[in-house]
Image: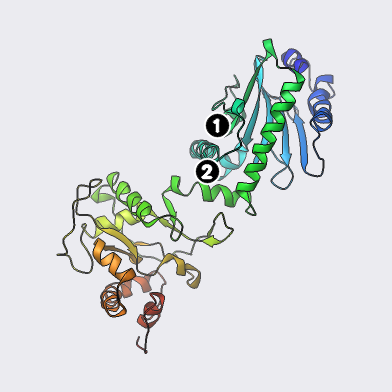
Amino acid sequence: MERILTEYQQARTVGGKGHPLSEVVRINMKETLFKEAGLDPNIYHVVGSVGIGLWAEIPWVSIFIKDLTISATRGYYIVYLFNADGSGLYVSLNQGWTYFKEKYGTKIGREKIRDTALIVRENLNTMPQNMNLLSIDLKGRGDLARGYELGHICGRFYDADNLSSSEEILNDLQGLLLTYKEVEGLIGNRSIEQFNDYILLNEDGLFLEDEASEEEYQFAVQESVISKKSDDIHVEDQKKERPEPTVNKGGRKQWTRNAVLASKALMFSNYTCEIEGSHETFISKSTNMPYVESHHLIPMARQKDFQYDLDQLANLISLCPLCHRLIHLGTDEEKEKLLRKLFDQRRGRLETIGIEITFSDLKRVYGISTNGGV
């Protein structure tokens, strides 16, 4: 590490391939980590890089859990990052920037990787006390340097003028390896993409129907209304292929509800109950309008039974709190009355978006006994 910090800036002016310092980063550090940190080669993969062709602005050495990833472009890993000006280096629990850039584009990708780092950090229980550095500054100007800075979850800085002892650096690594294993546990049997999609749900205004509390979802709907205007409502009922489900932390596939879309449904109803517009409610603190709640006539839990997307305005109903509770918890007779009215109101729009269901089948969805009907 001392040698890289001392010699790297000069080496960049000479030429890369075959340079002795390149071997220090790519080979010597790798071999030393396996030996001194006792890394099991069956579990861990270690890679060092000074760039491909031209010298990289930020040399790095990464430690990967093979079952998660073996690429610095995606997934989670531990990485030693050497500052562009040689002033020091970081050990960082980090994540692949390229994945976010390719999926979302540079601008949104930066927001997503930063949000992901924050959410993962908040869920860690084994983060070493001396690894609680919340941000890093690599003194670089390139896109990858910025990506590493945004992807940083936790870690520590080592000053070149007062570099820690080998023993301390190795002890730090052992502690961070435990945290890395915890991240592996958080991911579980999901792919990196499935895990990232799951933890970013709420940041994207999405909620799993039977996992997020109903109160949390309805609150998000109310908050989403604040940023909307009446002329933002655009109703165009059309078929949309159902999206891919999200894989929850238990490994089960579930579909999501979009709080922003639901807020449009409230606005479209003019904040009235679609069972009966005269139903009294209270004034919402968030919207300063009568409080109504969003309800999927055909629940999102039934998405697997339909080819087309259920999370659309045609399937979103505005209900007062009493009617909303009744349609979930009331007697079969009372629930059926409400459902019949809503079904008759929405049947045509549902067919337009490719959702066909009989009233008898809708009753079964709500657990109401049926003796026929259409």
Q: Quadrant of the C terminus?
A: bottom left
Q: Amino acid at mark 1?
A: Leu
Residue 363 vertical placement versus 23 (above, below): below
How busy is the neighbourhood of tag 1: few (under 14 within 10 Å), some, or many (20 plus)?
A: many
Residue sitting at 41 percent across and 72 percent down? Answer: 355
In front of the other: 121 or 257: 121
For the residues marked 1 and 2, what is the alpha-carbon distance in whole angstroms?
A: 15 Å
Numbered circle sitting on residue 221: none
Q: Amino acid at mark 2?
A: Tyr
Residue 54 showing in the rendered view: no
Q: Which residue is mark 1?
A: 150
Name the colouring of the figure.
rainbow
Disc 2 on helix, strand or loop?
helix
Q: Quadrant of the N terminus?
A: top right
Q: Quadrant of residue 212?
A: bottom left
Between tags 1 and 2, which lies in front?
1
In front of the other: 99 or 236: 99
Verify CB contact (< 8 Å) between mark 1 and mark 2.
no
Q: Earlier in the sequence, mark 1 or mark 2?
A: 2
Residue sitting at 53 percent across and 40 percent down? Answer: 116
x, y percent for residue 30: 80, 30
x, y percent for residue 348: 32, 74
In front of the other: 25 or 34: 34
Residue 21 vs residue 267: left or right? right
Q: Which residue is mark 2?
A: 104
Residue 251 showing in the rendered view: yes
x, y percent for residue 336: 29, 78
Residue sitting at 60 percent across and 47 percent down? Answer: 186
Task: Give the residue furthest to the bottom.
Answer: 371
Q: Quadrant of residue 36?
A: top right
Residue 206 vs residue 85: left or right? left
